[in-house]
Amino acid sequence: MKPTEKNLTGKHLIGGKYCGSGRRKFRAVNPAAGEPLEPAFCEAGAAEVNRALELADKAFEVLQTVPVKAIAALLERIADRLEADADRIIARAHSETALPPERLRSELARTAGQSRAFAALARDGSWAQARIDHALPARKPLPKPDIRALFMGVGPVAVFGAGNFPLAISAAGTDTVAAFAARCPVVVKGHPAHPGTCELVARVIAGSAAWAGLPAGMFSLVQSSGHEAGLGLVRHPLTAAVAFTGSLRGGRALFDAAAARPEPIPVYAEMGSVNPVFILPGAAAARAEELAEGFVRSLNAGVGQYCTNPGMVLAVAGTSFDRFLAAVCAKASRVPPAFMLHAGIQAAYDRGTARLSSIRGVKPAGSSGTGAPRGAGPKTAACKIFTADAGLIRRRPELSEEVFGPAAVIYRCKNTAQMLELARGMPGSLTATIHGFERELLAHGGLVRVLQRKAGRILFNGFPTGLEPCASLHHGGPYPAATHSFFTSVGTAAIYRYVRPVCFQGFADAALPEELRENNPRRVRRLVDGALDTF
Amino acid sequence: MKPTEKNLTGKHLIGGKYCGSGRRKFRAVNPAAGEPLEPAFCEAGAAEVNRALELADKAFEVLQTVPVKAIAALLERIADRLEADADRIIARAHSETALPPERLRSELARTAGQSRAFAALARDGSWAQARIDHALPARKPLPKPDIRALFMGVGPVAVFGAGNFPLAISAAGTDTVAAFAARCPVVVKGHPAHPGTCELVARVIAGSAAWAGLPAGMFSLVQSSGHEAGLGLVRHPLTAAVAFTGSLRGGRALFDAAAARPEPIPVYAEMGSVNPVFILPGAAAARAEELAEGFVRSLNAGVGQYCTNPGMVLAVAGTSFDRFLAAVCAKASRVPPAFMLHAGIQAAYDRGTARLSSIRGVKPAGSSGTGAPRGAGPKTAACKIFTADAGLIRRRPELSEEVFGPAAVIYRCKNTAQMLELARGMPGSLTATIHGFERELLAHGGLVRVLQRKAGRILFNGFPTGLEPCASLHHGGPYPAATHSFFTSVGTAAIYRYVRPVCFQGFADAALPEELRENNPRRVRRLVDGALDTF
């Protein structure tokens, strides 16, 4: 029995209407069963992409004039309806991704929570950073004009969700709700591995927009399993910005296409990262087993399919190192086998771990079992631990590339000076982690300063997986972690991906956006003549 | 007599030391005399670029640890020393650019003022937007970790100054002082048309860094007249960000080079823009002559060599239009001849105005005299006014491209509906201007909303030239006005070009940057658990 298929049309949802024709179709595959799922989904072509963007473009102008309470109501409604439809959505997402239902249930809660957080952000309005510099008509030698500015939406946004977060970073993920909060329309390119989940969620969004009285063109979902529709979205002249979460190769392809446009647009891609973990000697000596426990748990969270997955550990050679490595291998051997998101990711993981094994000086140190192969059924992934001398990192740059999945290399350093030197040569990462006693952290300020250049988030005595979407979170980092290190893909600051400052000079008060009017009718936090004006 | 040459070495100034060798040299040219200026300047090669960036990279780590008062003192010292050395700097800038000494004097004052504004910004510290979300160890189902974030410098910045602002947007211009305020080192590529001015200003910066006890590697000037040194700066692996002000062609070439790097970096280019002016019917009827006066003054400010120069006017056909056009032509005919910045700009202006003349339907309407040609001496530029039916704009996209210099086309619209339709099709601009009565502005809210998508700054009853560098100013806009519409090149918000968020999770208080420590020792404005924490 396939309980979810009858709810799905297999069509695109463009401006509130299902559409789709043509013979080219694709199907999602159940990664645990290795079997295609019903229904077949239409492949979007240039006509669908164009239609979605023309509607989005028209909707953008309308969205500038609707009351903010309609935007906030939409975002809250999306959260409510996701929760109301949770069972159906989770069932389909489970069949498309093999992620456990309990994990998907907490991801759905996070997705609804994000939408409500952006509703609150929109309603509050202070995110727009309204600034006012009053005129000084008597100033010499020249009068000073009245200048005011705030952040406003950029226009239609194209969103490419992540395979590993079919809810929180997909059709109704942070990018979509952040763009809505900024009054931007969104065209989602459905993820080819979970198109049914995308359709169910898109239905929630379209229904919520209708309920809130907002223009249907503000949201479209186009389905496609190939590259052309996505590239078409990025190249379309009406697209103003692009969000992508996924592989370095995929993100770079979209970035390159956007940079080559006659009018380049930003592609905010959050991509791969190796997320190094530095264990200082005191911590290694005092808590080798405890660190191993936390590390193996983090490495295997979501079958290693998190972008913050810690793929590289550096510790100083010696008995503490040996105890840590032995404990990691012991714990890794007990990790139960699990299915990855889809056969393509499993194959890439197999290639990545085979490449690690093939590097002279990298030694397999431990592994979980892969479970017995079940006839011709799909494979499960094994947690794989390797070890090597840290000096190898400099000689083999591919060791600093992400292997997506539950694999890590534990590097033996000569001393902490070598750790620092290697940190200096590392590429950008979403996260970097230091374990140590507080006095060790203070004694290694140089390491912190180097990691500040390399990572978007630096953790002390924690593990990088598991994001806390709050105002302080930064989920991004220097390339290849992200294509632009200023912007975050998670947390309320993600709204700044979809806005730009608009400055008004000498304007009539009644013609200004509400946030800039003299009497501050929306009571937003503003900077007025350099001083804060709050309520 | 050439009074300034003996002060100049013609060398690069790399990390506080003059250097330069090789036979390849270039000279600045006095645009008013058409004669080369002494001395000859060295052409930088890959070795100079590399040396400058290696020193900058080392200096970056040091800059993270110096007290903020040293950064602020540097910026104030630069302002003081520019003012102390004003006569010499202005004399050389005048001979290299033909800009009038009084204009250069006010530009120097603005340059010093900017440096002091960034000193104040750095000292205040609130620009870093420190955010703290405290831990909730008892939260269910998972404890919430302590997360804190702030903006920190990105690393070495390459700066390409503008030919038309040899002081305010050059060696010690906004980009340099904004990067310093963010604790970033700077490598300036000297402008080939004013290398002597760059050397004199670079000397001020290097001397000020030494005086403030800051690392000499934080600033370098490399001189070059070609493209290779500049491309070398953009392609160098240690460069973290690039600032450019100049032509669309130049900016796009750097943008493309940066996007093609193995690790792309942002190029913040502020480029050409046509800066449309919309005159609503009531204003045209009531104040045609007054508008013509202001318009011709703005069009000819700095011999039309401002990026905010208004090159396109739209007004409704009729007697008011005719009065406005006649008044513009009358006033334009009395504009005195003036030299442009250099022969290349003059030639491009001649090509641009010839191209306008050659378009069928574009009619020459008025012009100033070019002055009598003085033998074989350089030409002066004439203010040129053209007119055309507005419908032509859609059919001839080249009419929406900037002609750099004192030329404008005054378009005859059928009605304000056509204005709105044409505004919708326009490319990005730094500015857009509306003239009208207040009630007309309110009645044309649709035009304002369309211009919000097109321009970085929208003026009402003003003229776009003449920037007010304050917190509310935005000087940027959608492409081709700038390569990234989020960032400004003028005003204190320019600091955000050179920073990115760094997030700290679970950190020991003493290991955090001061702005994030629990007791807020720097008393910066922070967002703590969603609420504002100010002093």
Image (cartoon, coloured by chain):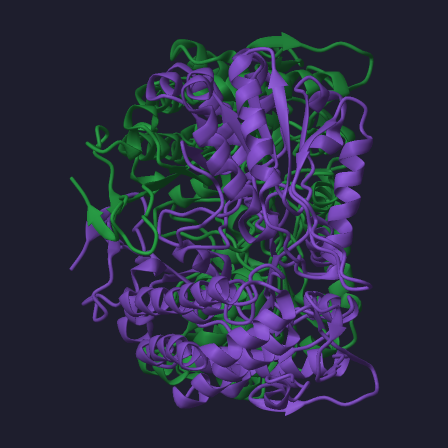
Chain colours: A green, B purple
* Residue A385 image position (x, y, % from top left): 63, 65
**Residue A73 drawn above or below residue B380:** above
Question: Which corner quadrant of the image does residue B35 belong to?
Answer: bottom right
The N terminus of chain B sits in image quarter: bottom right
The C terminus of chain B sits in image quarter: bottom left
Using the rendered image of the protein, determine whether residue A101 is visible from the camera's viewpoint: no
**Residue A531 drawn above or below residue B76:** above
Question: Which corner quadrant of the image does residue B220 belong to?
Answer: bottom right
Please state which of residues B206 and A421 is positioned toward the viewer in this rendering.
B206
Please state which of residues B167 and B446 is positioned toward the viewer in this rendering.
B167
Q: In this view, does A463 lie to the left or right of A526?
A: right
- The residue drawn where x is 75% and y is 33% is B398
Q: Is residue A259 left or right of residue A213?
A: right
Question: Which corner quadrant of the image does residue B423 belong to?
Answer: top right
* Residue A249 image position (x, y, % from top left): 73, 48
- The residue drawn where x is 50% and y is 28% is B451
- The residue drawn where x is 51% and y is 17% is B320
Using the rendered image of the protein, determine whether residue B484 is visible from the camera's viewpoint: yes
Please state which of residues B478 and A90 is positioned toward the viewer in this rendering.
B478
* Residue B224 image position (x, y, % from top left): 73, 74
Count all numbered tags in the image, as a single digit.
Answer: 0
* Residue B486 image position (x, y, % from top left): 50, 45
Q: In this view, does A130 lie to the left or right of A446?
A: left
**Residue A530 drawn above or below residue B413:** below
Q: In this view, does A370 lie to the left or right of B175?
A: right
